[in-house]
Amino acid sequence: MKTGIAALALIALPLQAQDLGTQLIPMHSHGSHTYYIHSEIPGAGEYSMLVDTGSGYSVINEDTLAKLLEGGQAEYVSKLRGTMADGSQRIIPLYKIASITLGENCVIRDFKAAVLPGNTRQIIGITTLVQAAPFSMSFDPPSLTLSQCGTGSPVEQAKVVAPHAEALPTPGPGQKNNQIPPAEADET
């Protein structure tokens, strides 16, 4: 009986991980063949963000950045030269943002976002989408399918995917990562 339960747990584990990883997110159009998805940036709020595979980085505005900085959820990375939709170029700051939830529960951590002035439109760019690759877009009905989605905190994810997993001992001096210290080795 125990063997049957263990085998069932091993079969169910990959299915759970697969269910957690792939998300179908509805897109909505504001006209002109532009598509938006619901998103939430913890510490800043909920937004309807443009899905733009032609944008290298995601884009947030200064208002959103101010909220994130206040809560310690953003870290300056560098400046970059950005080419705007009208062809003009600007030097703009790039920040690492702690996390964003796309749709209902596709969590992407530590994504980079360029910051544009004022309260400009916010964008999900290709570097953020690639973090959840492979991904695909469908236009009938409009939806975005993301893989490799996280849900909740990393600790919560580990409990769901591997409820009985234990941390391995830290290797001592002169040991390789896959060696078990002699005192902990099984002598059967």
Image (spheres, rainbow, N blue to C red):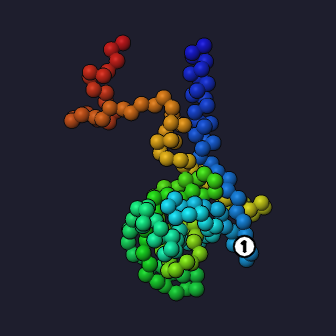
Q: Residue furthest left?
A: 173
Front residue of 47/158: it is 47
Circle 1 packing at 10 Å, graded few (<14), some (14-19), many (20+), is few
Q: Residue at x 43, y 81 (%)?
A: 91
Which residue is found at the position 61% from the left and 31% from the top? 12
Task: Residue 68: give x, y in percent of width and height.
Answer: 46, 65
Q: Residue 148 or 40: which is nearer the viewer? A: 40
Residue 53 shows in the view: no
- The C terminus - image quarter: top left
Say left or right for 17 vs 76. right
> Left or right: 23 with respect to 95?
right
Query: Relative to the observer, which residue lies in front, 46 or 123?
Result: 46
Image coordinates of residue 120 in percent, x first then y, are 56, 78
Locate residue 34, reporting x and y percent. 69, 72
Question: Which residue is label 1 attached to?
Answer: 30
In the rendered image, the quadrant that contains the N terminus is top right
Whether residue 133 is situated above or below residue 162 in the rendered picture: below
Residue 172 placement: quadrant: top left
Q: Residue at x 78, y 61 (%)?
A: 140
Kind of residue at disc 1 = His
Q: Is residue 77 left or right of residue 134?
A: left
The answer to whether any part of residue 16 appears in the image is yes
User: Is label 1 in a helix, a strand or a loop?
Assistant: loop
Left or right: residue 21 compared with residue 72: right
In this rendering, the answer to whether 179 lies above or below 59 is above
